[in-house]
Image (tube, helix red, strand yellow):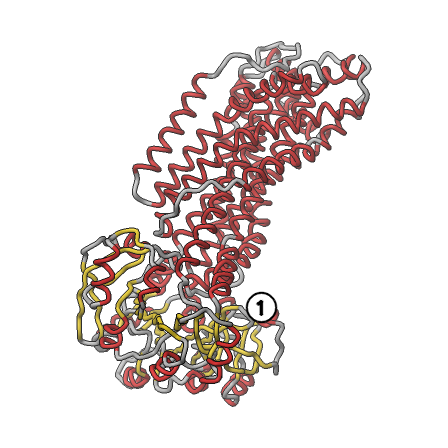
Amino acid sequence: MRLLVQSSRRFFYRHPGQLLLALVGIAAGVAVVTGVALMRDVLINALDLAGEELAGRDSVRVHHPSGRIDESLLADLATRPGAPELVPAIAARARHDGRILELLATDPIAVGGETGMGLDGNQINALMRNRAGVAMNEATARRLAKSEGDHIDLRIAGANHQLELTAILARGRALDDRLLMDIGSAQEVLGRQGELSWIEAPAGSRAWLEAELPEGVRIESAGERRDAAARLTEGMRANLTAMSLLSLAVGLFVIYSVLSFLLVQRRRAVGMLRAVGVTRGQITGLLATETFILAGLGALIGLVLGTVLADQLLTLVRQPIAELYRLVPAAQTRPTVTLYLAIWALAVALALGSTLAVWLEARRIPPGQLVRQDRDPTGTRPGLYAAATGLLITGMAVTLLSAGLAAALGGLFLALMGCALLAPRAGMLLLRLMRWPLKHKLAGRALGMLATSRRRIAPALAALSMALALSAGIGMMVLGFRVTVDDWIERLLRAEAYVTVSQGVIDAELTERIGELEGIAAVSSARQHHLPDGRVLIAYDLPADAWDGFELVAGDPGPAREAFMAGEAVLVTEPFARRQDKTIGDEIVIESGDHRHSLPIAAVYRDYGSDQGAIAVNADDYRDWFDDEVRDSLGLYFHETGDIERWRQRLEAIDERIVVTTPEQVRAQTLVVFDRTFRISWALAALVGIIALIALVSALLALGLERRRDHATLRALGLTRRGLTGLVVSQTTGLAAASALVAAPLAIAIHAGLTLVVQPRAFGWSLPLSLPLPPLGAMLMLALAAGLIAGLYPAWQIASRNPSSELRSRG
């Protein structure tokens, strides 16, 4: 055993590149898993961060479903016997230079001590003396490029405000992208005198609060807030988790390839040791130990890299999360030992399982085997192919027959694993076909050498095929989705111009004045309202032309329109119908004050604006129910299409607050948000591709060692170093091309699965299946370039060997 251990040590000493590839391969896979896992935790805790800073991790929140509490309730509770420590709060979303922030107002004296806002006495005084003063943590100040005394321009609830930075806090991770303000000042600035958003209290006071609170006021724990954030971000988190696990699976191919390479180099030594009494169990134990050490060390490196990666991934998703889900997550992750241990154990266990085939191969080496065995068995492996087919069929069945998102992703993962096992066989067939027209040339000889080394290149074929398929499949889904959103927004925007205001609101008087302008044929309007239970109402005034923008996925357009306009029915978006399990004819109950309104669903319409969904109601009914004459936006329909600049001047003459936006501008802004949302998908796909390239290089190094006598013979027969380099590069390029051809149908299948199954279950909307070709073309070009680049180092290493020493060796 000591001789075998020494052989292993000498091997890695002589081949540090293979050691590095193994470590990098597993580290990269673990890094992606770690980064996504840490980011998931941040998204889940996004709704609880403010409460955590105000009252500690174990707190409960007193709030009203309307989002507003009368301030007198705080005073009433605080004066009752046994009252706990109560912390008032006001929260409001703000924008600064396109960045979404949250204004968080509280009593600085109440939170300046143990709970961790980090305010000292001077900072508290400065914050309370300046009615426009705010504080922020150091990380937010750096991102906004602000220092104490600087002014900050904010847009809050349609109004512009200029506040002053009076204090920068040295701590407070939960204050990332949050501005802390004195609650009295915030009430004055926001025009919310006498109102609170919520009240924080210690978790142990829940029983007391339940006995003292009036009817209609609710208590929500930190765990319940985290559950709410988890439900909001479920689709995005599930998709990211699936991609991270796939990247780890590709990394496992690298471990297999490296250990297979190790066995090739030591086959002769293993045979000799078996002849002197070393048992199969001892050899298996050594290989398992090597796997454990490599995977364990690589996983540790991956945990460190993943922690750094998580913060980078957060920068890609924080703005989309804020825009889509109204959450302001922290800018930095908070790692835990439990999470690290779980990921490390998972990586090591999967690495041990992935190299089982290498151990079995080593056990089959007979005692005293001294001859070189560099040819793969030519027979087929029916057991492996049967298992692969079984995984593929099972995965497809689970994906198509199940109803949940987790089951769909699990089924898709099983199907991809089955495809990964079948990919090498398909790739070898393609290599033989590619060799046929080149059989009398050097490139044909190069491809022929690959075709007889299936076992060595199978991991690289599988890894590269899966990585290319995943990247192209995601690209096809994203581009197809983008085209669908573009078509949807173009159809939805029927007006010639849209009107909002820079501050304040669009009231009934302003709406009437705009509608009376000469040349305006009709005016549409929209008003969004959040119900106490979290559902979203959108009140529409819809002229005849505006109805053409609604694409119904269920329901008869004519009767649905008549019922809606008469106030006898509502419309719901497709995501709402899926999430609430509603269909045509089901009743929707809407409460306004002491009244309940029950209306049937007349139709379900397509909408990609929110994956939580919305209920569309007639605006006249909405104004009667909620006594709300405000509009969020107006759509203007002209008798004749005119100069938009002239119309802008006419509208601004009515009210200088008016902002006129064209449909083209709305469309462009929508696509910018879309592109920003999917940046992380492109980033993870690129990481998977990098890991696959590592697998490719590792397999080529193993193949080069295994074929060193063949290469030496070719050199002795007159092949130049340049020719040998071309031979190796032909192999890498051919292998990459075969992988791309195998990946093409897999990419289409991944695109179909994501579009037709995962997207509806994750986000609630359906997408038409299209076939964007640019990702497939880019995949082929990328594969050829990757194959060329990946072959340079192995080609240099192989060409630099002395052929005479290789020919004298007995292998």
Q: Amino acid at mark 1?
A: Ala
Residue 406 in sight: yes
Against 133, residue 118 (above or below) is above
Q: Position of residue 356 (x, y in %)?
A: 50, 26
Closer-to-camera residue (159/480): 480
Q: At 62% across and 9% down in the image, what residue appears?
A: 368
Image quarter of residue 302: top right
Evaluate whether residue 338 shows in this view: no
Rendered view: 499 above or below 418: below
- Residue 795, by quadrant, is top right
Tell which of 20 and 490 is nearer to you: 490
Position of 57 compared to 372: left or right?
left
Query: Does 519 appear above or below 19?
Result: below
Left or right of 735, for residue 337 = left
Task: Give coordinates of residue 449: x percent, y percent.
Answer: 65, 17
Which one is nearer the viewer's eye here, 129 or 392?
392
